[in-house]
Amino acid sequence: MAQLWGGRFTKETDRNVYLFNASIDFDKRLYLQDIEGSMAHSAMLAKQGIITAEEKEAIHKGLQSIKADVENGTLEITDKYEDIHSFVEANLIDRIGDAGKKLHTGRSRNDQVALDMKLYVRSEIKEVDALLKQFLEILVRIMEENVDTYMPGFTHLQKAQPVTLAHHFGAYFEMFRRDRGRMTDIYNRMNYCPLGSGALAGTTYPLDREFTASELGFTGPTLNSMDSVSDRDYVIEFLSALSTIMMHLSRFAEESIIWNSNEYGFVEIDDAYSTGSSIMPQKKNPDIAELVRGKTGRVYGHLMAMLTTMKGIPLAYNKDMQEDKEGTFDAIDTTKECLTMFMQMVDTMKFRKDVMERSAMKGFTNATDAADYLVKNGVPFRDAHGIIGRLVLVCIEKGKAIDEMSLKELQEISPVFKEDIFEAVSLETCVEKRLTIGAPGIAAMKQVIGECKKYLAE
Ligand code: ARG
């Protein structure tokens, strides 16, 4: 048991208490951040004349050798150490002796762990953002290829009005674009350095907090030392943003599952992203999409756990905060894995354009446009709504789409129908007439796609 304290104790910690208290099992993931923070801290200590230049050199060499040995596998991070901070410091002292004992001058594990976690979350925000960008690039490619792939748009999962596949995927483009915006917002708000806050009340050493903040790429130092060591808002914000990404993925997954079903057949998920059944030889299941949908629950769970952990904690640091790590790490890993698997599944998915188009034609998605046709020919909208309602009923009886009826059959319902009704309710016309920005008409869609591409190129 290697711990950084013990002077005032007369007894060893009980072994089970030691293990209960220890965080090394999960905070070993922060070894790079811990070393990076210690490099900046010791550079600042030397600059301020608190340690000598030689001591700083020795500390830097020692930290670099620890990093190299962890990476090449010669130095194992084990539960002999209470946490990652003890591991790095104990190994440093083993390697360079007394200079190593000076590293922790003007620092507490409280500001140290606040820094390590911030550095870790900060770099993960960038990684999640990069994955989102990759996904948007796949979506925009599919949008470009499908500006004239007609399909039904749904409300209540009932066919409503015709749209295009480009327009449908464009909706997801907007969702994941906003998710990227959240990454930037969180990054900018959290990017202040807690190092130098000490245990809670700063230190009496003449630290240069601006220096360490800038060495570590922060906008500046945090401005209240008690808040600095006990703030985990940014973890909660990140978990919330990850939950929102998972919510978007889960909706998309749900649609992929429905679209891939035998009944819909809008898409075919590639063999490489499907699984079979051990008993039913005919099956090809959308397990990837289902897992993404299912894993959403655990990311939400981690958000709720963190909110609950933080809610009753008095200022400043309390050990409860050690609970910020496992759930956050799992939420990050889960979201990144889901994003990666799901975007590859979408990238390789085949779209059955003919099935989508037939579905749009057969579902009375042009009923609103048929009513609008009557309105343009002088029928008040409320009456037109009733007439088309009756028409749909007749169509259902005859097993026909509106545009499959003869002019004579249509005129039996309303004499207002003329030959130009067929043009007016064709799928192409129905979509093409929707040309305001944000609508599925090809010209409007192409303009939006142009803006999406410009955004991705920025
Ligand atoms: N393992 C602790 C954590 O993750 C490190 C900080 C410990 N500080 C303390 N005063 N016990 O929060």
Image (cartoon, rainbow, N blue to C red):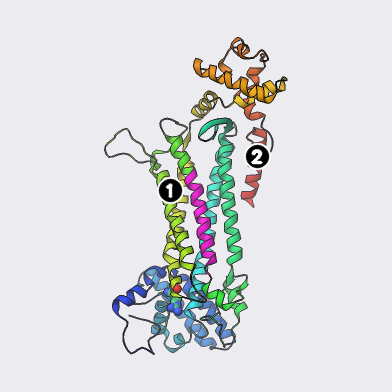
In the image, residue 249 lies at what x, y percent?
A: 49, 47
390 lies above or below 41: above
Amino acid type assigned to the residue bearing label 1 in the image: Val
Position of 75 with respect to 108 (left or right) is left
**Residue 417 locus on image (x, y percent):** 66, 15
* In the foreground, 97 or 50: 50
Question: Is there CB contact under 8 Å for labels 2 and 1?
Answer: no
The answer to whether residue 319 is visible is yes
Name the dominant secondary structure of the magenta segment. Answer: helix
Camera-nearest residue between 384 and 303: 384
> Between 427 and 271, which is closer to the camera in this rendering?
427
Magenta residues (range): 231-251
For label 1, the residue is: 292
Q: Quadrant of the N terminus?
A: bottom left
Query: In the displayed structure, does residue 455 sit left or right of residue 392?
Result: right
**Does 5 appear in magenta?**
no
Q: Secondary structure at mark 2?
A: loop
Q: Give coordinates of residue 106: x percent, y percent.
A: 53, 85
Report crowding for label 2: few under 14, some 14 to 19, many 20 or more residues within 10 A (C-alpha).
some
Q: Residue at x 52, y 23 (%)?
A: 362
Q: Residue furthest left?
A: 279
Q: Is residue 423 above or below residue 323?
A: above
Q: Please report the residue visible at 67 percent of the width from the left and 29 percent of the height from the top.
A: 433
Residue 247 colored in magenta in the image: yes
Question: Is residue 343 among what the camera can see?
Answer: no
Earlier-in-chain disc, 2 versus 1: 1
Residue at mark 1: C-beta within 8 A of ligand 1:
no
Residue placed under numbered mark 2 in the picture: 438
